[in-house]
Amino acid sequence: MTRLNWGMIGGGEGSQIGPAHRISAGLDGHFHLTAAALDIDPERGKSFAKQLGVAEDRAYGNWQEMLDGEKSRPDRLDLVTIATPNATHYEISRAFLEAGFHVLCEKPLTMTADEAEHIVAIAKEAGKICAVNYGYSGYPLVRQMKAMVTNGDLGNIRLIKAEFAHGFHADAEEADNPRVRWRYDPAQAGTSAVFADAGIHAFHMACFVAGQSPSKLSADFASLVGDRQLEDDAMINIRMDGGALCRLWTSAVAVGRMHGLTLQVFGEKGGLSWQQQHPDQLYWTPLNGRTQVLERGDATLSEQAVRASRIAIGHAEGLPVAFANIYHDLSEVLKASNAGNAPSPLALDYPTAVDGLWSMKAIEAAAKSAKSGGAWVTV
Ligand SMILES: NC(=O)c1ccc[n+]([C@@H]2O[C@H](COP(=O)([O-])OP(=O)(O)OC[C@H]3O[C@@H](n4cnc5c(N)ncnc54)[C@H](O)[C@@H]3O)[C@@H](O)[C@H]2O)c1
């Protein structure tokens, strides 16, 4: 199997999301970590890259050195993942896209909708992929939900209930913890805290599964702990362009909730319910019928869900496999493009910069609505 050359920026030793990317990119053997600038500390980044098997001359101290070192090589990187803190995403994505690299950027794509619009335009102009890691859309049963909606099993979608509510910022004593403080500081986090950080995954999944985009929304933001300047809880009502109503709750103060990402979709012919903490079961209730449990790994599920499963039915998969499906899609598209072929339509479900742009528009609209007492704002 031809392995693609893969570069990584950020995601250094001890980072939260770096290991998930390395496990996911490596899972199917499609990508090989070839070049890296992993850390804000140049020496630590180089040393960790070498420990991971990156050659000395491709273990860089920062992303600018990596760009200079990589852009003229004949054995070019096929994909560059950006897993640095949010405020750096725009500058780094832009530089690599302009230099002709395909990019997978962590969410949020940028800090503003204007910047996201710019990235969409640059990627289009350069003819390069800019994917965004809304990785939960890679879960096999989330893809099953999308396939069932697309297939018309639910009929018209009336209502979506999306949640990403956890309880890990509920302790007022933690106000000065640096890992918590920046998230509620507008100078570092932008116009929204918990919606931009967590709820935006639920928002993306609602759009992905329903195949609809937001038209307008009304948001109620609350800061329930101490004197936080940004919200730690939000309830958002979204009218979708395909006629569905989406009710989205996101929170960081819901003590006892762990990851707390759930999605329910209710149509005129039935309803679906999925929880990320139990990702291998999907509950399907046809109108006037009995609730059925669809198990991941069942060969009679949609071809999208079967393609996205790795481990036999009854054995737990999880987040790295969901992220691996994003990498799997990208590898198929990149290999097809390198060979001058069209990719399989099944490989085209990965989230793109356009999804990143919708997210930034939704965040800005929600912050504006919340400031004006929940007024409806066009997205
Ligand atoms: N998709 C998801 O589910 C998900 C989950 C968690 C985090 N994230 C996103 O991933 C990104 C990173 O989050 P995290 O929690 O891993 O952060 P983190 O603080 O745990 O790690 C950040 C890493 O980036 C490195 N870094 C910082 N600035 C850098 C620079 N200029 N150049 C190179 N490396 C640099 C740091 O040294 C560190 O290794 C954020 O944008 C976050 O929103 C996404």
Image (cartoon, rainbow, N blue to C red):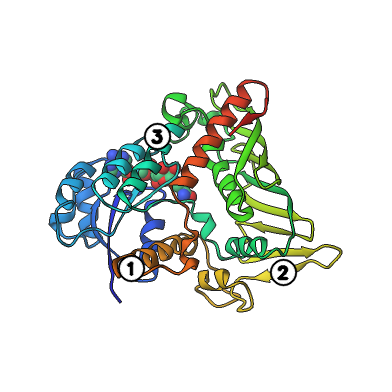
**Residue in the foreground of this view, choosing between 238 and 174:** 238
* Residue 39 appears in the figure: no
Q: Is residue 138 above or below residue 231?
A: below
> The residue tagged with tag 2: helix, strand or loop?
strand
Residue drawn at point x = 53 percent, y = 22 percent: 229
* Residue 213 appears in the figure: yes
Of the image marks 1 and 2, the number of the one nearer the N terminus = 2
Residue carrying label 2: 293
Q: Is residue 257 above or below residue 110?
A: below
> The residue tagged with tag 3: helix, strand or loop?
helix
Quadrant in which residue 287 is drawn: bottom right
- Type of amino acid at the residue the image marks with label 3: Glu
Query: Which numbered marker is on residue 335?
Result: 1
**Residue in the foreground of this view, choosing between 179 and 285:** 285
- Type of amino acid at the residue the image marks with label 1: Lys
Residue drawn at point x = 49 percent, y = 37 percent: 360
Residue carrying label 3: 115
Horizontal side of 216 relative to 89 (left or right) equals right
